[in-house]
Amino acid sequence: MFIIQLFQSGLSAVEIFIYLLAILGAIMVAIMCHEVAHGYVALLNGDPTAKMAGRLNFNPAKHFDPIGFLMMLFVGFGWAKPVPVDYRNFKNVKKGVLTVSLAGVGANFVIAFLCYLLGFLTYKIFGSTESSVFGSRIVLLFYLFFYYSVSINLSLIAFNILPLYPLDGFRVLSALAPRSKVTEFLLKYGNYILIGLVLFGTLVPSLDVLGIYVGFVSGLIEKLFSLIFGGWTF
Protein backbone atom coordinates (compact mmCIF):
# COMPACT_ATOMS: atom_id res chain seq x y z
CA MET A 1 0.00 0.00 0.00
CA PHE A 2 3.02 2.28 0.41
CA ILE A 3 3.36 3.11 -3.29
CA ILE A 4 -0.37 3.46 -4.00
CA GLN A 5 -0.84 5.81 -1.04
CA LEU A 6 2.24 7.79 -2.05
CA PHE A 7 1.00 8.61 -5.54
CA GLN A 8 -2.43 9.46 -4.18
CA SER A 9 -0.99 11.87 -1.61
CA GLY A 10 -0.71 14.97 -3.79
CA LEU A 11 3.00 15.44 -3.00
CA SER A 12 5.36 17.20 -5.40
CA ALA A 13 7.67 15.20 -7.69
CA VAL A 14 10.68 15.98 -5.46
CA GLU A 15 8.82 14.91 -2.33
CA ILE A 16 7.67 11.68 -4.00
CA PHE A 17 11.29 10.98 -4.98
CA ILE A 18 12.42 11.44 -1.35
CA TYR A 19 9.66 9.15 -0.12
CA LEU A 20 10.57 6.52 -2.73
CA LEU A 21 14.23 6.58 -1.71
CA ALA A 22 13.26 6.11 1.92
CA ILE A 23 10.84 3.27 1.16
CA LEU A 24 13.19 1.41 -1.19
CA GLY A 25 16.10 1.81 1.23
CA ALA A 26 14.01 0.54 4.14
CA ILE A 27 12.83 -2.49 2.15
CA MET A 28 16.32 -3.46 1.02
CA VAL A 29 17.83 -3.15 4.51
CA ALA A 30 14.98 -5.14 6.08
CA ILE A 31 15.03 -8.08 3.67
CA MET A 32 18.83 -8.25 3.39
CA CYS A 33 19.33 -8.29 7.17
CA HIS A 34 16.57 -10.90 7.52
CA GLU A 35 18.26 -13.31 5.10
CA VAL A 36 21.85 -12.64 6.24
CA ALA A 37 20.75 -13.35 9.82
CA HIS A 38 19.38 -16.73 8.73
CA GLY A 39 22.63 -17.59 6.96
CA TYR A 40 24.92 -16.37 9.73
CA VAL A 41 23.09 -18.28 12.47
CA ALA A 42 23.12 -21.36 10.23
CA LEU A 43 26.90 -20.95 10.00
CA LEU A 44 27.13 -20.75 13.80
CA ASN A 45 25.18 -24.02 13.94
CA GLY A 46 27.67 -25.72 11.63
CA ASP A 47 26.18 -25.17 8.18
CA PRO A 48 28.38 -23.14 5.76
CA THR A 49 25.98 -23.48 2.79
CA ALA A 50 24.89 -19.82 2.77
CA LYS A 51 28.48 -18.64 3.14
CA MET A 52 29.67 -20.86 0.30
CA ALA A 53 26.83 -19.55 -1.87
CA GLY A 54 28.00 -15.96 -1.26
CA ARG A 55 24.84 -14.99 0.62
CA LEU A 56 26.44 -13.64 3.80
CA ASN A 57 26.79 -10.13 2.40
CA PHE A 58 24.67 -7.04 1.90
CA ASN A 59 24.65 -7.01 -1.88
CA PRO A 60 20.97 -6.40 -2.79
CA ALA A 61 21.30 -8.40 -6.02
CA LYS A 62 22.13 -11.54 -4.03
CA HIS A 63 18.88 -11.38 -2.06
CA PHE A 64 16.47 -9.86 -4.59
CA ASP A 65 13.22 -11.70 -5.30
CA PRO A 66 11.03 -9.76 -7.80
CA ILE A 67 7.65 -11.03 -6.56
CA GLY A 68 8.53 -10.62 -2.88
CA PHE A 69 9.88 -7.11 -3.58
CA LEU A 70 6.69 -6.06 -5.39
CA MET A 71 4.66 -7.44 -2.50
CA MET A 72 6.64 -5.22 -0.14
CA LEU A 73 5.99 -2.18 -2.34
CA PHE A 74 2.27 -2.66 -2.88
CA VAL A 75 1.10 -4.73 0.09
CA GLY A 76 3.54 -3.84 2.86
CA PHE A 77 4.96 -7.32 3.51
CA GLY A 78 6.87 -9.75 1.32
CA TRP A 79 10.10 -11.71 1.13
CA ALA A 80 13.62 -11.95 -0.31
CA LYS A 81 15.29 -14.91 -1.99
CA PRO A 82 15.74 -17.44 0.84
CA VAL A 83 19.31 -18.26 1.83
CA PRO A 84 20.21 -21.93 1.27
CA VAL A 85 20.39 -23.93 4.50
CA ASP A 86 21.32 -27.61 4.83
CA TYR A 87 19.92 -28.86 8.13
CA ARG A 88 22.03 -32.03 7.87
CA ASN A 89 25.11 -29.98 8.75
CA PHE A 90 23.72 -28.77 12.08
CA LYS A 91 25.46 -30.00 15.21
CA ASN A 92 22.07 -30.12 16.92
CA VAL A 93 19.26 -30.25 14.38
CA LYS A 94 16.38 -29.12 16.63
CA LYS A 95 18.35 -26.23 18.09
CA GLY A 96 19.68 -25.31 14.65
CA VAL A 97 16.27 -25.23 12.97
CA LEU A 98 14.79 -23.21 15.85
CA THR A 99 17.55 -20.60 16.08
CA VAL A 100 17.91 -20.18 12.32
CA SER A 101 14.15 -19.76 11.96
CA LEU A 102 14.03 -17.09 14.69
CA ALA A 103 17.13 -15.27 13.44
CA GLY A 104 15.36 -13.44 10.62
CA VAL A 105 12.54 -11.99 12.71
CA GLY A 106 15.05 -11.30 15.49
CA ALA A 107 17.08 -9.17 13.08
CA ASN A 108 13.92 -7.36 11.98
CA PHE A 109 13.01 -6.63 15.60
CA VAL A 110 16.46 -5.15 16.32
CA ILE A 111 16.31 -2.97 13.18
CA ALA A 112 12.79 -1.78 14.03
CA PHE A 113 13.82 -0.84 17.57
CA LEU A 114 17.00 0.96 16.46
CA CYS A 115 15.11 2.90 13.79
CA TYR A 116 12.42 3.84 16.32
CA LEU A 117 15.20 5.14 18.57
CA LEU A 118 16.83 7.06 15.70
CA GLY A 119 13.48 8.50 14.66
CA PHE A 120 12.89 9.63 18.24
CA LEU A 121 16.33 11.28 18.41
CA THR A 122 15.83 12.96 15.03
CA TYR A 123 12.52 14.36 16.21
CA LYS A 124 14.03 15.62 19.47
CA ILE A 125 17.03 17.22 17.77
CA PHE A 126 15.35 18.80 14.73
CA GLY A 127 11.89 19.49 16.10
CA SER A 128 8.44 18.75 14.76
CA THR A 129 7.60 17.82 11.20
CA GLU A 130 6.20 21.34 10.72
CA SER A 131 9.47 23.11 11.61
CA SER A 132 11.66 24.59 8.87
CA VAL A 133 14.75 22.76 10.15
CA PHE A 134 12.99 19.40 10.09
CA GLY A 135 11.88 20.21 6.57
CA SER A 136 15.47 19.90 5.30
CA ARG A 137 15.36 17.29 2.56
CA ILE A 138 18.29 15.30 3.93
CA VAL A 139 16.83 15.24 7.44
CA LEU A 140 13.42 14.37 6.03
CA LEU A 141 14.92 11.51 4.00
CA PHE A 142 16.51 9.97 7.09
CA TYR A 143 13.40 10.49 9.19
CA LEU A 144 11.25 8.81 6.56
CA PHE A 145 13.77 5.98 6.27
CA PHE A 146 13.48 5.38 10.04
CA TYR A 147 9.67 5.59 9.87
CA TYR A 148 9.31 3.10 7.00
CA SER A 149 11.97 0.82 8.47
CA VAL A 150 9.91 0.47 11.64
CA SER A 151 6.73 -0.20 9.68
CA ILE A 152 8.30 -2.66 7.21
CA ASN A 153 10.33 -4.61 9.77
CA LEU A 154 7.35 -4.99 12.10
CA SER A 155 5.23 -6.17 9.17
CA LEU A 156 7.90 -8.72 8.26
CA ILE A 157 7.92 -10.01 11.82
CA ALA A 158 4.14 -10.45 11.86
CA PHE A 159 4.12 -12.04 8.41
CA ASN A 160 7.00 -14.45 9.03
CA ILE A 161 5.80 -15.81 12.38
CA LEU A 162 2.70 -17.26 10.73
CA PRO A 163 2.92 -21.08 11.02
CA LEU A 164 2.49 -21.57 7.27
CA TYR A 165 5.06 -23.22 5.03
CA PRO A 166 7.49 -21.82 3.85
CA LEU A 167 7.50 -19.04 6.48
CA ASP A 168 9.74 -19.00 9.55
CA GLY A 169 6.79 -19.65 11.86
CA PHE A 170 6.28 -23.05 10.27
CA ARG A 171 9.95 -23.93 10.85
CA VAL A 172 9.60 -22.96 14.51
CA LEU A 173 6.46 -25.06 14.84
CA SER A 174 8.09 -28.06 13.16
CA ALA A 175 11.11 -27.76 15.47
CA LEU A 176 9.04 -27.55 18.65
CA ALA A 177 6.17 -29.89 17.84
CA PRO A 178 6.45 -33.57 16.89
CA ARG A 179 5.41 -34.53 13.38
CA SER A 180 1.61 -34.53 13.28
CA LYS A 181 -1.33 -34.26 10.90
CA VAL A 182 -1.36 -30.50 11.53
CA THR A 183 2.28 -29.96 10.52
CA GLU A 184 1.83 -32.30 7.56
CA PHE A 185 -1.21 -30.30 6.43
CA LEU A 186 0.58 -26.96 6.84
CA LEU A 187 3.61 -28.29 4.97
CA LYS A 188 1.46 -29.49 2.09
CA TYR A 189 -1.04 -26.64 1.84
CA GLY A 190 0.63 -23.69 3.63
CA ASN A 191 1.80 -22.14 0.39
CA TYR A 192 -1.69 -22.24 -1.10
CA ILE A 193 -3.27 -20.85 2.07
CA LEU A 194 -0.79 -17.98 2.02
CA ILE A 195 -1.43 -17.17 -1.65
CA GLY A 196 -5.18 -17.41 -1.03
CA LEU A 197 -5.02 -14.98 1.89
CA VAL A 198 -3.02 -12.46 -0.16
CA LEU A 199 -5.34 -12.71 -3.18
CA PHE A 200 -8.47 -12.53 -1.03
CA GLY A 201 -7.20 -9.42 0.75
CA THR A 202 -6.34 -7.82 -2.59
CA LEU A 203 -9.73 -8.58 -4.14
CA VAL A 204 -11.80 -7.84 -1.00
CA PRO A 205 -9.90 -5.14 0.95
CA SER A 206 -12.66 -4.83 3.54
CA LEU A 207 -12.06 -8.48 4.50
CA ASP A 208 -8.27 -8.47 4.30
CA VAL A 209 -7.69 -10.97 7.12
CA LEU A 210 -3.94 -11.13 6.54
CA GLY A 211 -3.60 -7.35 6.47
CA ILE A 212 -5.68 -6.97 9.63
CA TYR A 213 -3.54 -9.57 11.41
CA VAL A 214 -0.25 -7.97 10.29
CA GLY A 215 -1.51 -4.54 11.36
CA PHE A 216 -2.61 -5.87 14.76
CA VAL A 217 0.72 -7.56 15.56
CA SER A 218 2.74 -4.61 14.23
CA GLY A 219 0.62 -2.25 16.30
CA LEU A 220 1.22 -4.21 19.50
CA ILE A 221 5.00 -4.09 19.06
CA GLU A 222 4.88 -0.41 18.16
CA LYS A 223 2.87 0.31 21.32
CA LEU A 224 5.65 -1.41 23.30
CA PHE A 225 8.24 0.84 21.63
CA SER A 226 6.08 3.88 22.34
CA LEU A 227 5.91 2.99 26.04
CA ILE A 228 9.70 2.68 26.15
CA PHE A 229 10.07 6.15 24.63
CA GLY A 230 7.58 7.84 26.93
CA GLY A 231 4.57 7.65 24.66
CA TRP A 232 6.31 9.13 21.60
CA THR A 233 5.20 7.85 18.18
CA PHE A 234 6.10 8.71 14.61
Image (spheres, rainbow, N blue to C red):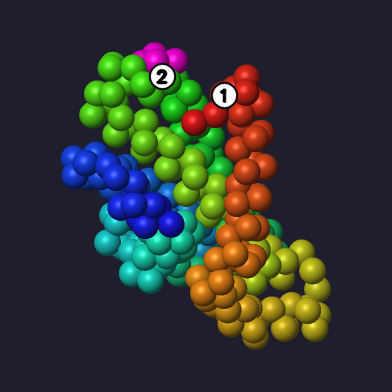
Residue pictured at 43% horizontal, 49% vertical: 30
> Label 2 neighbourhood size at 10 Å, few (<14), some (14-19), many (20+)?
few
Residue type at mark 1 is: Trp
Residue type at mark 2 is: Ser
Secondary element at image label 1: loop
- Considering only vertical position in the picture, is 181 above or below 14? below
Magenta span includes 159: no
- Considering only vertical position in the picture, is 179 above or below 50? below
Q: Which mark is residue 232?
A: 1
Q: Which mark is residue 86?
A: none
Question: Foreground: 40 or 233?
Answer: 233
Total numbered labels: 2
- Considering only vertical position in the picture, is 217 above or below 187? above
Name which of mark 1 and mark 2 comes first in the sequence. 2
Q: Position of residue 87 (x, y in %)?
A: 58, 70
- Residue 89 visible in image: no
Residues at marks 1 and 2, CA–CA distance in whole angstroms: 12 Å
Magenta span includes 127: yes
Pointer 2 residue: 128
Range drawn in magenta: 124-128
Question: Foreground: 185 or 59?
Answer: 185
The reply, left or right, for residue 88 in relation to residue 53 is right
